[in-house]
Amino acid sequence: MLFARRRLAAITAVLAMSVTSGAVISPAFAHPRETAKNATATGFGGAVSSVDAEASAAAIEVLREGGNAADAAVAAAATLGVTEPYSAGIGGGGYFVFYDTGTGQVGTIDGRETAPAAMPHDAFIDPATITPANPAGSPYRFTPELVTSGVSVGVPGTPATWERALERWGTLSLADALQPAIEVASHGFVVDQTFRQQTLDNKPRFEAFTSTSSLFLPGGDAPAVGSVFQNHDLAATYRLLAEQGTDGFYGGPLAAEIAATVQAPPKTATTRLPVPPGRMTAADLAAYRALDQAPTHVDYRGLDVFGMAPSSSGGTTVGEALNILDTFDLAGMSTPENRAPALHHYLEASALAFADRGKYVGDPAFADVPTAALTDPVFGKERACRIDPLEAAEKPVLPGDVSAFDGVCPAGAAAPADEKDTENISTTNLTVADRWGNVVEYTLTIEQTGGSGIVVPGRGFLLNNELTDFSTVFVPTDPNRIEPGKRPRSSMSPTIILKDGKPFLALGSPGGSTIITTVLQTIFNRVDLGMDISEAIAAPRASQRNTVKVTAEPEFITAHGSGLAPFGHILVPSGDAFTSAAEIGAATAIEFRPDGSMVAAAEPFRRGGGSAMVLTPAP
Ligand code: GLU
């Protein structure tokens, strides 16, 4: 085997721990999680940043063995499918961005989930609500009914993304790239507080399914902190992929089982959740393709910023906001004592870009998305006219007119966009660079933390609920309305920034629609406020998504609330009734320094802290 495990020395420390794998208890294992997590690592020869030490270790192992960044990213992502199964895995989708040092080009893969061919426009309407008085009916409640359903499950894109990424840019076979993850799934990882808490947060949903409760609630409880969790079913599914490639996922018995699970979720007898069934078929799985896409591009203060084009709104929205901000001297209006004027501009630019996202962005295979206009600096300059340097605009602000712009401040605008934000805060992100200079930024998800809550019986992975990223109510002019075969609009924003044609910074984050603001704010912190990349990630966050109130982490409100109040910004603490955290995002990044060193940076605290590693630490 190419990647035999070499960390046996660490076994003894955890041999006494209890081992959980659904019902299977294993007396011995050869692979505990590396528990040391560092949020920053500086060095040479390759680097990785992810939320999880096992995933980062898998990437480093592949890099050390001579694999490149694409190989390492797939190995790390597959490992995240084991250790972060509520955020990402083969039951979901994502967006993979690659800087190819050989060509100097950035390429992307759209591995977004798709709606089944038989998905009707009114799929989210509860039939029980259709009456003579209400012939159109009303949508299911979003949480927990719609998110915990077969109808919200999109055809997964992650296996196809891994295969396509390796084919285009990798050097390993899928079988080799999956080996580290197979080892972690077989031998287990040590449960931390985040994993336990995410399981507990999902308990009522997981209890609704026989397959999910037996895997993630062994003995009726979430796995204990410090116990070792094994997932033999997932190891077997990964082995199937290793042997058969993605044909073993998009065809054959597994595809039939996925379709059957979506059409008739394995409900427990006691659950009260309605769990609306979906209409996915084996033919939908067979038809799935990960798509090669050109990246979005904007120039921000001389840096070339490449992002993810639609079906994600990440590249256009981050790009438009940067184009708006590019017209202001943010560094000149900010001092370490008073950052409020610059932050005011950041918040306002974000609101404007979100207005345009709502009006114009959807799956480009179904909607005429004006990607070029949205990322045009002249359009950004015109949108910047809407920012009053002293006063926050009334929200929601109106979208701009992408059909006619000349950079001159206009007198009027189009219809308002006041979308309800139903994206969740889950997902995961990783950044990898290799010794040759290739770079990967990859964001992947199953949408909600815990996805649809439905494990494919005996297969060890959760299905996504990504289709809830479609607009819930059907409006014919909405670019993100439900349509069969379509990809729901995403906010995922994997971003690679070049300086003078060479990598300068790669970054991304989970966090639903706050992904966009987290990436934007981190770039703003790094480039305009002069923070180093670790500080830029650690700094408290605020997210203005064209709403009356600005969602902000409590630390942000403490630091900047009084400074922003005179501008009219109303800051409210982040967090909701369904999650225990008030955090915005969980970013990862790598910065490339002129001396050839790489600074891998992860979260110091959010989501329990991330894991940054380098191949050869700087002396
Ligand atoms: N479904 C979201 C999106 O595609 C991501 C979910 C999340 O980050 O929690 O943008």
Image (tube, grey):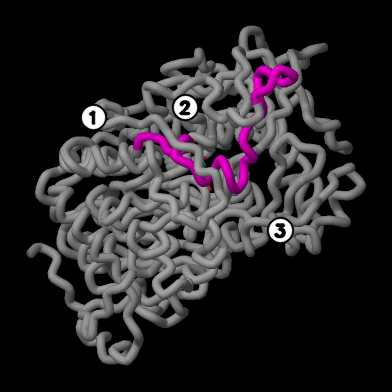
The answer for how far apart the CA atoms under marks 3 and 2 are is 29 Å
Callout 1–callout 3 Cβ contact below 8 Å: no
Determine the residue positioned at 32% across, 48% down: 90
Q: Is mark 1 within 8 Å of ligand 1?
A: no
Callout 2–callout 1 Cβ contact below 8 Å: no
352, 366: nearer the viewer:
366
Return the residue at label 1. 286
Q: What quarter of the picture does the N terminus occupy?
A: bottom left
Residues drawn in magenta: 130-155
Q: Residue 470 appears at what percent x and percent y?
A: 54, 30
Q: Which SS class for mark 2?
A: loop
Q: Which mark is residue 310?
A: 2
The answer for how far apart the CA atoms under marks 2 and 1 are is 23 Å
Q: Residue 76 appears at what percent x and percent y?
A: 31, 58
Q: Which mark is residue 323?
A: none
* Quadrant housing residue 561: bottom right
Return the residue at label 3. 553
Label 2 sits on what residue type?
Pro
Q: What quarter of the picture does the C terminus occupy?
A: bottom left
Which one is earlier in the sequence, the residue at label 2 or at label 1? 1
Q: Residue 137 appears at what percent x and percent y?
A: 66, 24
